[in-house]
Image (spheres, rainbow, N blue to C red):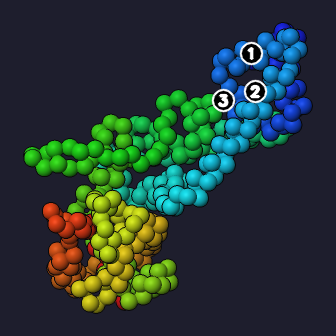
Amino acid sequence: MIIAGTHEQRREQALVDRFTQLGITDERMRLKILGSLSIEQEEQIFQDIEKEEFSLIDNILKQAEADQKNMEVKLGELQTQLSQQWVISREELAKRLETWMELGLSMIDQKHELTFSTKEWSRPVFRNEGTVMEPAQAKIAVIQDRKFTFDPEFKVFGREKDNILLAGLYPWHQKEWEGVIKHRPLHKSDPIGRLACSLARQGRADFTTISANRLYPKFSSLRDARYLLFVTHPLREVENHASASTDSYLTVYAFSCDLSQPINPQGASAKEVYQMISLLEEDALRPNSQSLTVNVLESAKDAGQELARWLEQSRKLGGLTKKSYFLPIPVALVAVLP
């Protein structure tokens, strides 16, 4: 805030005028340039403004503009050089949590009760003519009395952002329990992770079914699939096995009636895994979803034994002479019903 008619206001206006004369009209570029200046450079600029000596100011501003443009070019090159990795967005995370609410999963453990609300707020939008405020809505989730937003801009600019954390998926940490090392979410700072961990450890979380009519139109390459095996790859970074996928710790292997080898030996990509889980959730929410029968369960048990043999035969743990690693850990099984 600057009081009109003061020396500070005249000095600020002189700086704005220099930007305009140099052709730097983009408000975002101006802010970037000013943010990149050192304290010494800012003091030098304002001293020269008072002396009406603009040559040094122009040199500093032009160099800062060139540095910012060069940085944007370098970032653009970096983005094209990096191999693309698919990750779930905060919007997709919110959608998944809302689906869990519809399924009633968050009510299994009262400690992880999940609720949603919406806050109205004003979002700043930067334009050439200046900053304008536009109405917006921020989705707020409450887990264990802790509030989370899925909108990073609300967390930065929202007036009611205090005591509201930015939702995300955090790394789990190692914890020793009765001599066994386990990975678990942080107890206090990651309620979303604790909710996911709690649900994953439920007795009925390792088996479900889906109809072929629902699966095949979405995944045409799996048209012969009879079982879908979800597995994790905890050693993904060092795996160099011929059938190892490259971008997902959690993947899916599809099997036909022949359970000795998967249809997709590379496994499913991270995006395909997300789409598969979303399809299973949608199917579970359908009013006429299929119920489990004794025959389906018995067939799944037999298939599980065959798949266990495939896992054992495929597993590679390297050694002194062989450096091949492939460690799929089974998580859940899905039977594809005709």
Is residue 100 visible to us here? Answer: yes
Cα distance in 3D space between marks 1 and 3: 14 Å
Q: Which residue is mark 1?
A: 44
Dot 2 or dot 3: first in sequence order is 3
Binning the other alpha carbons within 10 Å of mark 3 as few (below 14), some (14 to 19) or many (20 upward) gives some
| Badge 2 amino acid | Ile
Dot 1 or dot 2: first in sequence order is 1
Q: Label for residue 60?
A: 2
Query: Which of these two is toward me, 338 or 154?
Result: 154
Who's the residue at 68% across and 43% down the image?
Answer: 70
> SS for tag 1?
helix
Q: Nearer the viewer, mark 2 or mark 3?
A: 2
Q: Is residue 226 left or right of residue 41?
A: left
- Decide: is 16 above or below 180: above
Is residue 280 visible to us here? Answer: no
| Badge 1 amino acid | Gln
> SS for tag 3?
helix
Question: Can you give x and y, in whole percent of width and height, for residue 76 in the image?
Answer: 63, 52
